[in-house]
Amino acid sequence: MNPGDAIEKHFTRLKTEQKRALTKLGIRTIRDLLYHFPARYENAGPTGTIAGVTTGAEVTLYGTVRKPDIRKTWKSRRPVAEAWLEDASGKIKMMWFSQPYIAKTLRDGMVVKVNGRVGGTGTKIYLANPEIDKSPVAPEAVHDTLFISGTEIPRKMYPIYSESRGVSSLWFLHAIQKVFETKAHEEIPDPIPTEILARYNLPSLSSALIFIHAPRRPQDAAAAHKRFAFEEVFALQVVMQQRRRTFLAQSALSVAVNRGALADFIGSFPFPATRAQIRAIDAIVTDFEKTHPMLRLLEGDVGSGKTAVAAATAYLVATSLPKGRIAGTLQVAYLCPTEILAKQHFSTFVSYFKNHPIPIGLITGSECRKFPSKVRYEESAKLPKTAFRKMVANGEIPIVIGTHALIEKSLSFKYFAYAIIDEQHRFGTAHRQKLATKGASAPHLLSMTATPIPRTLALTIYGDLDLTLLDEMPAGRKPVITEVLGPERRGRAYERVRAELAEGRQAYVICPRIDEPDPTKELALQAKSVKAEAARLGKDVFPDATIAILHSKMRPTEKEETMQEFEKGEIDILVATSVVEVGVNVPDATVILIEGAERFGLAQLHQLRGRVIRSTHQAYCFALPESFGQVTKDRLKAFINAKNGFELAEYDLALRGAGELTGGKQWGVSDIAMEALKNIKLVEAARAEAAHLAAQDPELKNHIALAARAHIADREMHLE
């Protein structure tokens, strides 16, 4: 059995739904199958019986489902799915709170394996929200292992794999057993050099595969997880080092640095620049003076002034003549993730540049604009796309701000020298590379993000970039007063909104969903919706206020009109989804209510709170969760107490893992590697080893297996 062979070659009896499921999970070869690691392990000791369970115990039971049904709790009218589990020793009730759809997936007489915690007391015990395996191994076969004969010490850990419709955890267990029996795992070349394995006491690849799929002890699984985490981070770092070396080997257009003119431009800002902003600008300008292109990540908390740094450095580039010419200037491209944000940055740049005769362009999917207008200098004019593209191609517009339309092939630059990417995490690596290849030479590249990123994640995902932090807020900004309120205290938030509206201020109300769910299809989702909540607030709570809605399904023109009305103060309360999470800037909005706060990640909550840190007025944030479990309490307590987004990000990483911060899928990083990001020593070691190896063997000619592994890591990072 060759690890590189397609999986169908060795599993010829695969059904259509199994093939579809494996493809969905990214499993195409035997190697892919071996790298589909268990999501967790269960105790594979003696199977429990229902008669023997005790309150508080975590149990695994086998039995038959009886009488699945849906009911509502007496007081809160909360939907509950119920069923009985029956075995030879007795029966026990199973309950799934706020998950009524589960009852529809069960049928009377179904044989299942159930894993969950026992709640209740005395004779009224039950299984609370248990997990169900509908393709269980028979109870008498629970102790079967992959490699152990009856005379050997039995293994105590039973692997549980993530599933997809068509392939169960049990299917994976038997499939991997078949692969191991052929010893195909021993034929996969180890991508980590033996000297590095020895240096960090890591198991070889063949041993680690056995340890992770069939651990006899927790120490086996831990050693395997450490090894595979190191492997993935190491491969990513090798990719980053190669990418950085390739990029820095190119030459950039020379930027003529006039520090006196730059100081005058910064002095024209409507606010004094912070020391952190000056440090960031100086670091970027220093990079401009080098012969190779800049690669820098600017990470700043919400409201720390990243746009001002971008404007100041863009001014320097846009006033710099191309080498050997007496006319024309270098050009800047500013890529934004949404049309709302692109138009807002265009407006902000216009305000910064109104006393400086530098044309600024805007390109989105719906329109193109140019400042200044030929008719009125202080205004921008709408242009046909063909005319706009021609002006950019001729070098007549030095600064171009836009959405994905900016990286289309139809838009070309004459003297492209500086690329700025806002909210870097919203774009894939492919987008960054498309923008970087817009000109004849490599542009200086500045990536920016207001999403708090723990240091380990920044070192891993942005390993090819130099890091600059904006860790200081503009003078006069007051910390947002943040409170978490249960349903009985909701009136307190409404009182504050009324007080702010009376002062001429505005408010946001954020809801997790756009429409009310279809009660026949989505009973489990009880989250408030934008449309229904806006109607309720207008009718019952704020009848005298002007209320509008904003969400992703609205047409671009509708969204723009709504935002313009909100910015002008014509709307008192904007009820929206998290579409306002990034960059939206309305200084008079001083209070935000976040419905279903437990449904948002901490980084996202912090971004939403940042919508009201846009002036020197005191701002307020009210988190209104629907449920108050211990995890919700802990997370929202951290949300209240964290001094800044960076502290919040580190907390979230420790509490929930990096997937909560950013989503491992989005980064192209596995769950194991994301969890490893809690270990700064591991990440730094992988980074150092990758840098050392890349310096000695840049093209990995002597490390063929590592080159193949790095290619996989690079491919996965490119997946959108």
Image (spheres, rainbow, N blue to C red):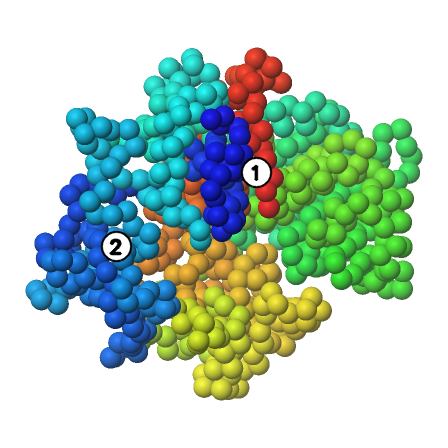
244 over 456 or under it: above or below: above
Residue at 89% over, 64% down: 375
Whole-percent x, y for residue 38 in the image: 36, 40
Residue at 53% over, 76% down: 531
Q: Is residue 204 left or right of residue 571?
A: left
Residue at 37% over, 15% down: 198
Q: Nearer the viewer, mark 2 or mark 1?
A: 2
Looking at the picture, tell me which residue is in the foreground, 462 or 213.
Answer: 213
The residue under label 2 is: 114
Tag 1: residue type? Met
Residue at 74% over, 57% down: 364
The residue under label 1 is: 717
625 over 316 or under it: above or below: below
Whole-percent x, y for residue 8 in the image: 51, 38
**Other-residue count near label 1 (Cα within 10 Å), few / some / many at <14 / 14–19 / ≥20:** some
- Give how far apart the Cα atoms at labels 2 and 1 are: 36 Å
Q: Residue furthest right?
A: 326
Tag 2: residue type? Val
Looking at the picture, tell me which residue is in the foreground, 230 or 680.
Answer: 230
Q: Is residue 55 visible?
A: no
Mark 2: which secondary structure? strand
